[in-house]
Image (cartoon, grey):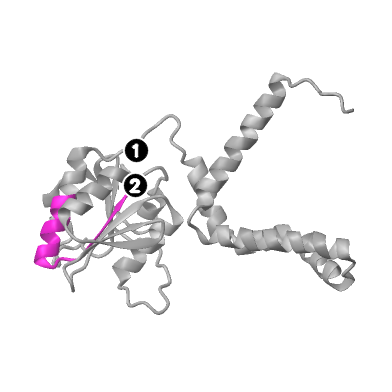
């Protein structure tokens, strides 16, 4: 008979910390390609133990050498995902909240609706937990002005000097304009530069991007590297309210 060991408060604290870490890991990986790759690595792990148990020496030797360099393999496969995950962990809003208030959402919605009607192209990036100050430092022009639909439309007017690039909104203010975003690859899809930039910045951060197409007069929302066509201003307002 096994003697039951007493459960101490340290054991409970240890279990709680591990549970929280696993939960956060699942939340970070949910819906990403990293989850599929980790599933594949899990299957290889099972195959490794099965091959050792059945005496499949060649397969066992091969998998053993693969797992001996597993750390390097993970870093190579997940370099972009690791960077994003570490950034999100560091940006967890324990003591602060970066929320876009209802008035700010309405200004963005009305500006996008009007620019879509006038066929004015625009890319609006709304900061959440992760700071985007490096985007401003590299190429952008600091504005630091109160968020308003008129200012957004003036910035993206085709003859305005700052209409190229993205506008970054932080804490309800227009932080910068003419910011250059990282471009995502879109193999087999005919996305323009603004849409690829929206995919790129939302893949590398937790920001939300809104794109107005000057060719089609459509509004598209980007989140976690994925684009979603927004049919009208009411739907855009609803989605932004849900996010913020």
- Which range is magenta? 109-126
Question: In the displayed structure, would residue 133 be above or below residue 15?
Answer: below
Q: Earlier in the sequence, mark 1 or mark 2?
A: 1
The quarter of the rendered structure image containing the N terminus is top right
Depth check, front residue: 142 or 221: 221
Residue found 16% across the figure and 45% down from its top: 106
Q: Residue 174 location in percent, x, y?
A: 24, 47
Q: Which residue bears the numbered disc 2?
A: 127
Residue 17, image quadrant: top right
Residue, disc 1: 98
Task: Answer above or below: position of 236 versus 145.
Answer: below
Q: Position of residue 12 (x, y in %)?
A: 67, 25
Q: Are marks 1 and 2 in contact (CB under 8 Å)?
A: yes
Horizontal and vertical percent position of residue 100: 27, 40
Q: Secondary structure at mark 2?
A: loop
Quick check: 88 left or right of 52? Answer: left
Q: Specify whether residue 87 is in view.
A: yes
Q: Residue at x 71, y 26 (%)?
A: 11
Whether residue 188 appears in magenta in the rendering, the answer is: no
Q: Quadrant of the C terminus?
A: top left
């Amino acid at each position: 008979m096994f003697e039951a060991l007493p459960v101490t408060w340290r054991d409970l604290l240890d279990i709680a910390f591990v549970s929280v870490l696993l939960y956060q890991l699942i939340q970070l990986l949910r819906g990403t390609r990293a989850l599929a790759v980790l599933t594949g690595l899990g299957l290889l792990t099972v195959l490794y133990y099965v091959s050792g148990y059945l005496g499949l020496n060649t397969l066992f030797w091969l998998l053993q050498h693969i797992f001996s360099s597993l750390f390097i393999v993970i870093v190579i496969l997940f370099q972009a995902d690791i960077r994003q995950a570490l950034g999100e962990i560091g940006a967890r809003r324990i003591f602060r909240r970066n929320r876009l208030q209802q008035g700010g959402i309405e200004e963005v919605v009305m500006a996008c609706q009007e620019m879509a009607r006038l066929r004015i192209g625009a890319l609006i990036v709304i900061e959440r937990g992760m700071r985007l100050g490096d985007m401003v430092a590299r190429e952008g022009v600091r504005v630091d002005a109160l968020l308003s639909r008129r200012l957004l439309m003036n910035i993206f007017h085709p003859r305005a000097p700052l209409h190229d690039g993205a506008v970054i909104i932080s804490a309800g203010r227009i932080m910068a304009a003419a910011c250059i975003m990282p471009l995502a690859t879109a193999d087999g899809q005919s996305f323009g530069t603004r849409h690829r930039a929206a995919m790129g910045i939302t893949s590398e951060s937790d920001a939300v991007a809104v794109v107005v197409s000057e060719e089609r007069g459509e509004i598209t929302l980007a989140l976690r590297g994925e684009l979603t066509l927004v049919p009208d201003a009411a739907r855009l307002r609803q989605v932004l309210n849900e996010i913020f």
